[in-house]
Image (tube, rainbow, N blue to C red):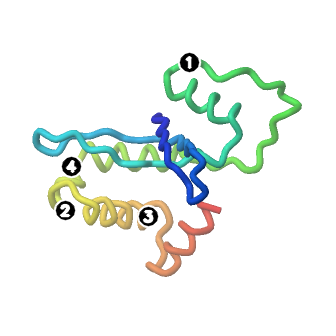
């Protein structure tokens, strides 16, 4: 997690400091290190930003009393994990093409047909409904 501070002078001549809290992913392209911003947490309260920072650094999350938590929904995922593991074991992703976004989409469409055999439109609706 990165904290970015920008100091500027506004039109009235007063110094202003802008602080941004960003979740970033670092990766290399050749010899250059690149940064991809995954999320901007600047609008969150300070205690939430500190909680995210501590969890991302590997610390255990602060315990919250059970009466303060509410489960909104539970999504089964064991059958999906089993199908993905089996497909990777037989080498299905490598059959499509080299690693790319297109391959991931094609792989997801094939797995969707196995998990929920429907048309492409029905698969799209099923995915949208499961993300809500």
Cα gap from disc 1 to disc 3, whole angstroms: 36 Å
Residue 5: x and y, percent?
49, 39
Q: Which mark is residue 59?
A: 1
In the picture, the quarter occupied by the C terminus is: bottom right
Which residue: 61% across, 57% down? 12
Which residue: 45% across, 44% down? 81
Q: Earlier in the sequence, mark 3 or mark 2?
A: 2
Cα gap from disc 3 to disc 4, whole angstroms: 17 Å
From the viewer's perspective, is the residue at label 4 or at label 2 nearer? 2
Cα gap from disc 2 to disc 1, whole angstroms: 39 Å
Q: Which residue is mark 3?
A: 112
Question: In the image shown, does 53 or 81 lie closer to the viewer?
Answer: 53
Which residue: 20% across, 54% down? 99
Cα gap from disc 3 to disc 2, whole angstroms: 16 Å
Q: Residue furthest left?
A: 30
Q: Is residue 58 above or below residue 3?
A: above
Q: Earlier in the sequence, mark 4 or mark 1?
A: 1
Q: Earlier in the sequence, mark 1 or mark 3?
A: 1
Q: Which mark is residue 91?
A: 4
Q: Secondary structure at mark 3?
A: helix
From the viewer's perspective, is the residue at label 1 or at label 3 nearer? 1
Residue 35: x and y, percent?
32, 44
Q: Which mark is residue 115?
A: none
Q: Earlier in the sequence, mark 2 or mark 1?
A: 1
Dot 1: few (<14), some (14–19), or many (≥20) neighbours within 10 Å?
Answer: few
């Amino acid at each position: 997690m990165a904290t970015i501070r920008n100091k500027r002078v506004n039109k009235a001549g007063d110094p202003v400091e802008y602080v941004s809290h960003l979740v970033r992913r670092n990766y290399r392209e050749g010899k250059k290190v690149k940064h991809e911003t995954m999320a901007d947490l600047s609008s969150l309260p300070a205690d939430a930003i500190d909680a995210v920072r501590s969890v991302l650094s590997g610390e255990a999350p602060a315990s919250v009393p059970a009466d303060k938590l509410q489960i909104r929904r539970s999504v089964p995922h064991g059958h999906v994990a089993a199908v993905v593991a089996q497909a990777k074991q037989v080498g299905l992703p490598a059959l499509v093409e080299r690693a790319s976004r297109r391959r991931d989409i094609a792989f997801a469409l094939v797995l969707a047909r196995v998990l929920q055999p429907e048309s492409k439109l029905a698969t799209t609706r099923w995915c949208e409904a499961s993300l809500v």
